[in-house]
């Protein structure tokens, strides 16, 4: 089996931690503890680790960085000696004081019937295509975009819910702030600082009903600002493109290669804004390369372009260091959208949106008139989970589980479709596979569904002609189901060929 260049890394190696975007490759030889202590001290100083926040357990952080536990213990000891952190026994290691050079705390900123199954892959996908595909019966659903719903932390959620509801005053059951509850906005700001390297004041966070609503709100505001085109990656998410088109925005395609979106093509196209998935491009899985990032920053900072960053599954990485969010580097030109749909469940309909000051008030107005704000109680429960450290524990659990399922899918592809090229294996919840032979990938998707296996054809996500391929989700299926599904697709492929 062939494999794209980005997937050649040993899948058993963890190269860094999402916590503070730590990458052990940045450390000098022989100076790991000193390097780690300096990085932690800087994070306390600049506010990414505020007073009261808890550091990861030494065993956990050592495992993520691939260093000895003694290195982490020594770094923590130095911070304890400096008086910046303190050990609290079962409560962990907690930040108790910032260095005297720490910046002052920032105040809030101003803030129809679905088509028949036989017609599913015949016509171009319509607005209801995902509803129709979800409704299609199947033995094995390998559709991308679905997390492991069986792993939803029911016990922790119920515990947090009891804690939250037991402490609410009668007035807390009234209408909430359309921007979201202060508790969740604070928790999201802390989560983004710890896990995505983004420094943001809670007052800048807008809680939305998932990334889909974030796109809808942005589309309305941008159209009112005179922007009628938002360029998109090609191949890129069909769903995102549909949302933009629904709000009467054109979505011209910009080609993606092994380094991500081609910025020179973006310039030539002339759109004022672009929607990107830079940390894990959908569906190819490539990471936006360093030179491309710098060129994109020039396009935005110097030429006035606006970037919409969809950080849809950046936490789910297995064989590569963490990738910084674009929002952490050029906040004034990036609208950032994220959610818990891929970490907990899409059913929660909770996400967040960060926007430059130019658009923030208009987005809050759009959110207010859309629904008066997300439901308050789920926000408070989620805030409790995020601040208690449970979300990080859930992420570590899912990474191990997803890695096994990804490996099972790759092994099955090697066995049953040896000519397929696998893309995007280092991160995410899906794989993309492409084929050298000439056939219509919608025919392969239809033949697979007729045999009880649900997949998405690559052509759904492409506006320009491309090699035939499939986009396959693995997070929601067991290794046994994955092996069965891939074997079925392989049989359909041989008959089609």
Image: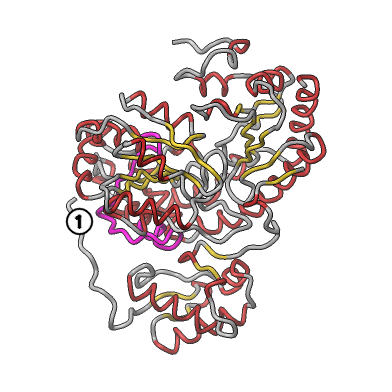
Tell me: residue 71, above or below residue 350: below
Q: Nearer the viewer, residue 464 or 169?
A: 464
Q: Position of residue 353 (x, y in %)?
A: 33, 45
Q: Write the residue at 78% across / 44% down.
A: 411
Q: Write the residue at 56% across / 47% down.
A: 258
The reply to whether the magenta stretch includes residue 421 is no
Q: State the image quarter where residue 119 is shown.
A: top right
Label 1 sits on residue: 109
Q: Which residues are magenta?
A: 189-213
Tell me: residue 329, above or below residue 266: below
Q: Position of residue 432 (x, y in %)?
A: 63, 38
Position of 394 compared to 200: left or right?
A: right
Disc 1: CA contacts within 10 A as few (<14), some (14-19) or many (>=20): few
Image quadrant where one finds the C terminus? top right
Q: Write the residue at 62% across / 52% down.
A: 6
Majority secondary structure in the magenta region? helix
Tell me: residue 372, above or below residue 344: above
Position of 186 compared to 422: left or right?
A: left
Instruction: Tell which residue pokes out farthest to the left in this image.
Output: 110
Q: Position of residue 93 (x, y in %)?
A: 48, 76
């Amino acid at each position: 089996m062939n494999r794209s260049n980005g997937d050649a890394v040993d899948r058993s190696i963890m190269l860094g931690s999402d916590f503070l975007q730590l990458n052990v490759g940045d450390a000098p030889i022989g100076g790991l503890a000193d390097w780690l202590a300096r990085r932690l001290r800087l994070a306390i100083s600049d506010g990414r680790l505020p007073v009261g926040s808890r550091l990861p357990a030494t065993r956990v952080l050592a495992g993520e960085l691939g260093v000895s536990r003694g290195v982490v213990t020594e770094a923590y000891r130095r911070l304890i000696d400096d008086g910046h952190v303190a050990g609290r026994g079962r409560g962990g290691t907690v930040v108790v004081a910032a260095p005297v050079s720490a910046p002052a705390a920032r105040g809030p900123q101003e803030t129809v019937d679905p088509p028949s199954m036989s017609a599913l892959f015949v016509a171009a996908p319509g607005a209801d295509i995902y509803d129709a595909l979800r409704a299609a019966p199947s033995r094995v659903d390998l559709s991308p975009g679905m997390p492991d719903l069986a792993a939803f932390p029911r016990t922790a959620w119920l515990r947090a819910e009891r804690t939250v509801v037991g402490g609410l005053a009668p007035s807390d059951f009234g209408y909430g702030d359309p921007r979201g509850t202060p508790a969740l906005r604070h928790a999201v700001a802390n989560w983004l600082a710890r896990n995505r390297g983004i420094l943001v004041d809670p007052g800048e966070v807008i809680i939305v009903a998932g990334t889909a609503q974030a796109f809808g709100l942005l589309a309305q505001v941008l159209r009112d600002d005179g922007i009628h085109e938002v360029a998109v990656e090609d191949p890129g998410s069909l769903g995102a493109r549909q949302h933009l088109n629904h709000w009467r925005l054109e979505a011209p395609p910009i080609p993606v290669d092994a380094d991500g979106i081609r910025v020179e093509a973006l310039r030539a196209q002339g759109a004022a804004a672009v929607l990107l998935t830079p940390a894990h491009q959908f569906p190819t899985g490539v990471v936006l390369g360093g030179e491309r990032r710098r060129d994109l920053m020039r396009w935005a900072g110097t030429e006035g372009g606006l970037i919409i960053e969809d950080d849809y599954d950046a936490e789910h990485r297995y064989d590569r260091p963490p990738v910084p969010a674009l929002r952490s580097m050029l906040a004034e030109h990036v609208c950032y959208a994220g959610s818990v749909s891929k970490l907990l469940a899409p059913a929660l309909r909770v996400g967040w949106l960060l926007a430059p000051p130019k658009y923030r008030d208009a987005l809050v107005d759009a959110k207010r008139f859309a629904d008066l704000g997300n439901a308050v109680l789920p926000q408070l429960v989620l805030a409790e989970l995020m601040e208690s450290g449970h979300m990080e524990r859930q992420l570590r659990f899912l990474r191990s589980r997803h890695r096994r399922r990804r490996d099972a899918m790759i092994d099955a592809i090697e066995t049953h479709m040896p000519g397929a090229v696998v893309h995007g294996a280092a991160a995410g919840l899906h794989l993309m596979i492409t084929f050298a032979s000439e056939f219509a990938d919608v025919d392969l998707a239809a033949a697979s569904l007729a045999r009880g296996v649900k997949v998405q054809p690559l052509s759904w996500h492409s506006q320009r002609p491309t090699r035939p391929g499939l986009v396959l989700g693995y997070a929601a299926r067991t290794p046994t189901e994955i092996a069965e599904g891939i074997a079925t697709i392989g049989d359909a492929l041989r008959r089609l060929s």
